[in-house]
Image (cartoon, rainbow, N blue to C red):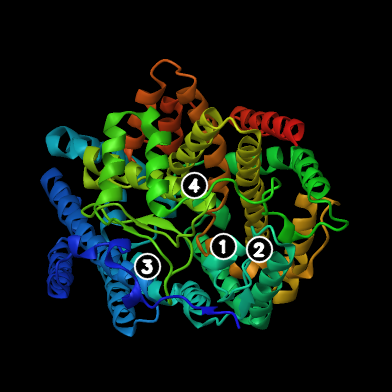
Amino acid sequence: MTDIKTLPTRAEVPEALTWNLELIYPTEQAWEADFQQVKQLATEVVKSKNKVGESATQLFNVLERSHETFRKLEKTYVYASMKSDQDTNNNHFQGLNSRVSSLVANVSADLAFVEPEIIAIRDDQLKTFLEEEPRLANYAHYLESLRLTKNHVLSADSEALLNGAEEVFESSSLTFGVLTNSDLEFPYVQDENGQTVQLSNGLYGALIESTNREVREDAFTALYSVYDQFQNTLAQTLSGETKRHNFLAKVHHYPSARAAAMAKNNIPEQVYDTLVEQVNQHLPLLHRYVSLRKKILGVDDLHMYDMYVPLTGEPPLNYTFEEAKSEAKKALAILGDDYLSHVDEIFNNRYIDVVENKGKRSGAYSGGAYDTAPYELLNWQDSVNSLYTLVHETGHSVHSWYTRHNQPYQYGEYPIFLAEIASTTNENLLTEYLLKTQTDPKVRAYILNYYLDGFKGTVYRQTQFAEFEHHIHTADANGEPLTAESLSDFYGNLNSHYYGPAVEKDPEIALEWSRIPHFYYDYYVYQYSTGFAAASSLSQLITTNQPNATAHYLDYLKSGSSDYAIEIMKKAGVDMTKPDYLEAAFNVFETRLNELESLL
């Protein structure tokens, strides 16, 4: 009989492979002290209600005190949420997370008066305040950005009511998270070695890349058999989240949820439309790659579970976590010693939670707050994919480090639109490094294949997600019910449109919408695609040693939200208001596809 391999419990994971959250709070009592202090700080800010615009000094003091409140609130929230993420089965940590989520809602409601009162200040009066109080200069861009929303901010009482209902609004997203991370029980399958393993979202990512087609198919059908059982529940949670986005956009006088979401970062909707148009124009390149995949694999029928296996057979490159850290540093050395010093800090101080355990949140992310280290959550597998994930999340983490150490708190977070550019630039630099250092034709073909798969999974797949996301929001706004059947029908047809006639219409893939957490993030996914394309341009500037390219790139990492995202990227060397950067990315894809075809 074969051994049954199960996930370790949290207690069974070696300490060296866990993140050290004691760097945030050495004890839970310290967390509790800050938790209580947040309440006190909020109470002090509330005393300024209806007085924010009385004087320049009063405006400055309210800004300082309210930001101090949210700064400490974020620290308490990050600690509790990461404690919860490391083991979603731990009821105590779930309780901490629930308490701080309630605190976020309450404080947001209590302080909701601040921004409407600032917006209500007359333009000439605000100009006078800026002249009278030099300390307000550090808030100039913040105030300008805030006043752009003047026509979309409700009265203080209305904003307080909406903020107070945030826990209600989050119920669909929270239910999805608990259901998919904790409650869903996946069946046992066999891996490549014939070992019986319990399927999980993390393990699925490795098994779907197996060179054993039977392993891939079994993992694919087993995973979706579980989501199939809960498709109606998951349709309800997604419908609830979509209604939330549409409702909040409507009450804030935006024409659509997409307009509201993009206005947060002052991104023109044209950027979204241009992305979808450009990707659809270049679908023939994806169809060509898919046809190559079918030919190389030598299969009569190409299925969606065949889309991730390397075309070159068994991966010639695999990395332990320690090996991956070494390779990552070599790939990122082109960014300079200062950048590498921060990579070392992240790698060597238990900022990373490495391996999967029972109840741990799936996927990967870089987290933290202004006053914490830039932490990373991984679910490590010894693979090239995990190396790329490490480099990707470290891109986020170093971006966070530079921003938090070069900007005041009010600009100490970067918009999502900029976030994916830093992480994906790192991925592109890793690809360039591997292509320059690996001369074995088999290894080189594998890297090219990996890059093309990454492009497929980011630019093409995330734009497919973006089209789906826009469809469900538009359908709901038009009064169309979002049922499991309607969601699956649309998604299945969209998937066929993207991948073309060479791929079979597997019924399971029509359910893919049910397991994507990013559909709960409010028009988030398009930024993966724009970010990848912009990163392609930046990495080309850096690796070809264009004048000041690295310096301009580091300046972008240090900018946070001190300027509008589009303007920050222009200074870095990429104008994202035009389609040129997308066309350049597709040119790289085609060039590498040509090279892979010749090698194979």
Q: Residue furthest top?
A: 547
Residue highlighted by disc 4: 388
Residue highlighted by disc 1: 519
Q: Which amino acid does the dot numbered 1 rest on?
A: Phe
In the rendering, at what x and y percent does residue 283 appear? 76, 42
Mark toward the start of the polypeptide (4 vs 3): 3
In the rendering, at what x and y percent does residue 449 appear? 66, 42
Q: Is residue 282 above or below residue 488?
A: above
Mark toward the start of the polypeptide (4 vs 2): 4
Residue highlighted by disc 2: 472
Mark toward the start of the polypeptide (2 vs 1): 2
In the rendering, at what x and y percent does residue 36 appear? 14, 73
Q: CA distance from mark 4 to mark 3?
A: 45 Å
Q: Which amino acid does the dot numbered 2 rest on?
A: Ile
Near mark 2 (Cα within 10 A), the count class, few <14, some 14-19 or many ≥20, is: many
Residue at image location 47% in from the left, 79% down from the top:
182
Q: Residue furthest right?
A: 300
Residue at image location 66% in from the left, 78% down from the top:
231
Q: Is residue 387 above or below residue 363?
A: above
Residue 546 visible in rendering: yes
Q: CA distance from mark 4 to mark 2?
A: 31 Å
Q: Are the residues flagged by discs 4 and 3 in contact, CB closer than 8 Å?
A: no
Q: Which amino acid does the dot numbered 3 rest on?
A: Ser
Q: Tell me the SS state at disc 3.
A: helix
Looking at the image, is mark 4 or mark 3 nearer the viewer?
A: 4
Looking at the image, is mark 4 or mark 2 nearer the viewer?
A: 4
Near mark 4 (Cα within 10 A), the count class, few <14, some 14-19 or many ≥20, is: many
- Quadrant housing residue 221: bottom right
Q: CA distance from mark 2 to mark 3?
A: 27 Å
Mark toward the start of the polypeptide (1 vs 4): 4
User: Which of the two residues, 456 or 494, is positioned nearer the viewer here?
Assistant: 456
Residue at image location 40% in from the left, 35% down from the top:
330
